[in-house]
Amino acid sequence: MSLEKFKIAHDKQNSLLYWFPKICNLDIPVPKTEWVLVKEDLLQYLGSEKEFPKELRNKLIASGRKIGYPLFLRTDILSGKHDWERTCYAQTENDLIGHVYTLIETSECADILGLGINAFVFREFLQLDWKFKAFEGMPIARERRYFIKNGKVLCHHPYWIEDAIAKGWHKYPLPNNWKDILKELNKETKQEIKILTSYAMKVADIMDGFWSVDFAYSKSGKWYLIDMARGEVSWHPNCKYAKEVES
């Protein structure tokens, strides 16, 4: 990673605390979201006998109850979704603090110098139209990544590619026909492209620079905007705009 990309990866704009307040009122479906700010280094509580701060613990528990279980838990930067059952998927309140600890570890290991935690984010658990599970129990559904830059939609792609799943570690056996299922999930329809392009344009109209915008399809028939990050450091499949990431 170049020094420039390293700086972008650690830029505060990648934080949900930066981009979510800007897009949450754009008439685009988003999960109900709450967060608890973190003002201290939480690494000191890993592998030690120090008690997790009571005030922070109480705030986390209160936010979990406000959103309701099951819920999707993440930091303002990442979710550790490949470790689904130990990180972002909190099924009950009893799971919460253990998952918080795992997210602290995941954040520390996410980059050469680790990625900091400015907040723990509690999100409504979306019932996605998933067809099989991969990695550590993560539901694989219709998800898309759109790239926007300076007021324009550049391109769009299915999020889950075959290679990512083929090379992954899976706690549970994949269905024998998972490749065929994935191909069906990854078919982008004209109606879908029309809807998501309109959503992406709403974001592009207010967000300067280069961004990835991720969407997921729910069982209710809605597409939700679920994540964003600086485009320069977002995974981008091979297309004519991929050089924007490489440059």
Image (cartoon, rainbow, N blue to C red):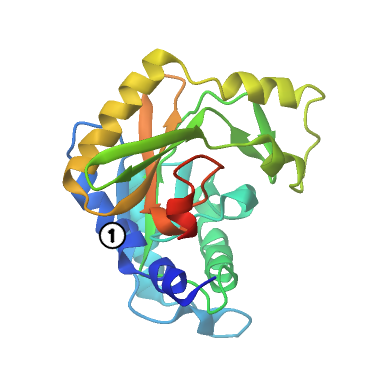
> Splitting the image into 4 quarters, where does residue 135 fall?
top right
177 or 231, nearer to the observer: 231
* Whether residue 95 is situated above or below residue 199 in the rendered picture: below
Which sits in the foreground, 236 or 59?
A: 236
Where in the figure is residue 213, as x and y percent of width and height? 37, 43
Amino acid type at image mark 1: Leu
Q: Residues within 10 Å of mark 1 (few under 14, many from 20)?
A: some
Q: Position of residue 80 (x, y in %)?
A: 56, 55
Residue 29 appears in the figure: no
- Look at 25% across and 32% down and name the residue there: 28
The count of marks equals 1
**Which residue is at a point 41% across and 71% down the rendered structure image?**
10
Residue 17 falls left or right of residue 123: left
Q: Is residue 109 above or below residue 122?
A: below
Residue wearing tag 1: 17
Looking at the rendering, in which quadrant would you find the N terminus?
bottom right
Asked whether, in this view, residue 219 is left or right of residue 181, the answer is: left
Let me know if residue 10 appears in the view.
yes
Screen quadrant of the C terminus: bottom left
Image-based side of 167 in relation to 29, left or right: right
Task: Residue 124: give x, y in percent of width and height.
Answer: 38, 40
